[in-house]
Amino acid sequence: MPVARAARAKEYLARLHQVLPEKKASHCIFVAEYFASFAESLGLDHDDAVAAGLLHDFCRCVPKEELVQRARQLRLSISGVQLERPILLHGPVAAEECRREFGLSDEVYEAIYWHTTGRPGLGRMGQGLCVADFAEPTRKYPEAGEARELLRKDGFDAALRFVAEKKAVFSQAKEVTDPNTEAFLIWLRRVQA
């Protein structure tokens, strides 16, 4: 089923175009389409996958200082790492703002909240969004293509593990690393063993 036919998709798209530049809104659409293409094979609701994909970067273009301010206003927990790298707050702030505006399910809320870093115990919706965001078809880095190929050939769990490993490597290359990224990978290795 096309993304535009999903419940409330038109409403989400209209808001996306108000808060994001065209290139970032297009990325969200591609994430939603890609996620929807494999969501049902994971036992996930198509419309929830579309909602998570469309709304995951709802606050991605909010300036860093404003992300911290909004997180405080929303009474979100803010880590020292998030204060040093406020862009890591775009998922939590988007999850909370979208929940208030659109009434998201807990599953979609969690997926949006943790899509950047992951976390131990992350549900299947969140896992799927991590893969879809990393590997959507317009992503140009070679690892995105590798993740898509793994999903196609070896299945979701192989693709998810690959994405988590690559995110951990990319995170370690930064000056400040979110411990949730590494913890998510360790947890995944344990549950997939």
Image (cartoon, rainbow, N blue to C red):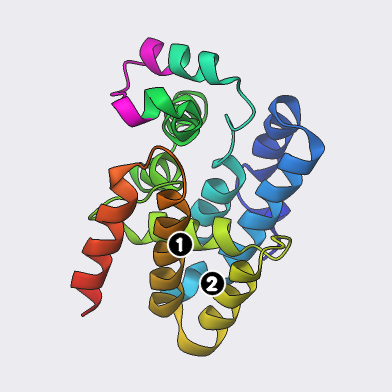
The amino acid marked with disc number 1 is: Gly
Judging by the rendered image, the residue that carries numbered circle 2 is 38
Looking at the image, can residue 44 be seen? no
The amino acid marked with disc number 2 is: Phe
For residue 99, which quarter of the picture? top left
Label located before the other in sequence (1 or 2)? 2
As helix, strand or loop, the secondary structure at mark 1 comes to: helix
Is residue 157 toward the left or the right of residue 60 in the image? left
In terms of depth relative to the viewer, which is nearer, 16 or 114? Answer: 114
For residue 178, which quarter of the picture? top left
Farthest residue in the right direction?
22
Image vertical order of residue 160 relative to residue 101, above or below: below
Q: Give the label on residue 128, or none.
A: 1
Residue 147 falls inside the magenta stretch: no
What is the span of residues highlighted in magenta in the rendered image?
A: 71-81
Q: Residue at x 38, y 71 (%)?
A: 161
